[in-house]
């Protein structure tokens, strides 16, 4: 699986630096990734949905560290 396109929308916020969409193999897109400035530097937060109890659950996420590193 290869990343075929990345679209980034820069944000002027302090911690939320950008929103991103990533296309895989020209046939599958994940929207709603967030580029966030954390205590240890930038990281990518996966798209999530707020549950009724106020917690968040990822909608899409990499299964292993190699894929997470590829996305980041």
Image (cartoon, rainbow, N blue to C red):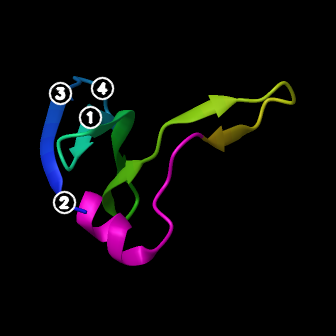
Where is mark 3, residue-wise? 10
Marked residue nearer the N-terminal end (1 or 3): 3
Q: Residues within 10 Å of mark 4 (few under 14, many from 20)?
A: few
Q: Which element type, helix, strand or loop, lies under badge 1? A: strand
Residue at 48% x, 37% y is 47
Within 10 Å of disc 1 (Cα), the crowding (few <14, some 14-19, many 20+) is some
The residue shown at (12%, 42%) is 5
- Residue identified by numbered label 2: 2
Q: CA distance from mark 1 to mark 4?
A: 15 Å
Q: Which mark is residue 20?
A: 1
Q: Please report the bounds of the magenta region as a residue range.
A: 59-71
- Is 59 rendered above or below residue 3? above
Q: Is residue 65 left or right of residue 22?
A: right
Q: Do the CB atoms of the residues marked 3 and 4 lie less than 8 Å apart?
A: no
Q: CA distance from mark 1 to mark 3?
A: 9 Å
Q: Is residue 52 visible?
A: yes
């Amino acid at each position: 699986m290869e990343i075929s396109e990345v679209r980034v929308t820069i944000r002027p916020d302090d911690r939320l630096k950008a929103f991103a969409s990533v296309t895989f193999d020209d046939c599958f897109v994940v929207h709603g990734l967030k580029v966030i400035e954390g205590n240890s530097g930038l990281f990518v937060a996966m798209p999530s949905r707020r549950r009724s109890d106020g917690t968040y659950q990822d909608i899409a996420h990499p299964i292993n560290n190699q894929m997470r590193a590829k996305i980041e």
